[in-house]
Amino acid sequence: QVQLRESGGGLVQAGGSLRLSCAASEHTFYAMGWFRQAPGKEREFVAVISRDFDETIYANSVKGRFTISRDNAKNTVYLQMNSLQPEDTAVYYCATAKFLVTNPNLVGVWGQGTQVTVSS
């Protein structure tokens, strides 16, 4: 089974930027995406990208601020996060699934997560 490992989280001030990376242990032919979970809240969808780059979906809360991309040669998916706000604070999880899923219950494989903290 493919394994996912996130990196790039950290502490940033409001208005700042971070870039998350997720490296897969092997090539995946599936869609890849990002979800996040804040303390006391359910895990929620952030963004997903299709296997062939031709389709992306974003949560309304991040549309226009976050950009998802992938490099299949490196088995890596990225999440560029700009104009970060305190409400973006959460553990961010990389995920892969057979389809462009926005429901965390339909995710096939999860990464271990990386913490993103945005200070006001």
Image (cartoon, helix red, strand yellow):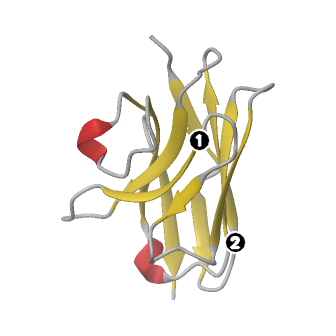
Q: Secondary structure at mark 2?
A: loop
Is the residue 30 above or below the residue 86 in the image? above
Q: Are marks 2 and 1 in contact (CB under 8 Å)?
A: no
Whichever of callouts 2 and 1 sits on the residue coming sooner in the sequence is: 2
Tell me the residue that label 1 is attached to: 50
Residue 106 screen position, x and y as percent: 28, 37
Instruction: Say which residue appears at 68% left-offset and 64% top-offset.
Output: 18
Q: Quadrant of residue 67?
A: bottom right
Tell me the residue that label 2 is attached to: 17
Residue 36 screen position, x and y as percent: 39, 56
- Which residue reaches farthest front? 54
Residue 82 screen position, x and y as percent: 67, 74
Mark 2 or 1: the one toward you: 1
Instruction: Say which residue appears at 81% left-offset and 25% top-offset.
Output: 73
Amino acid under label 2?
Ser
How far apart are labels 2 and 1 at the CA level?
A: 24 Å
Q: Which mark is residue 74?
A: none
Instruction: Name the residue nearer the viewer: 44 or 99.
Output: 99
The residue carrying pointer 1 sits among few (fewer than 14), some (14 to 19) or many (20 or more) residues within 10 Å by Cα, namely many
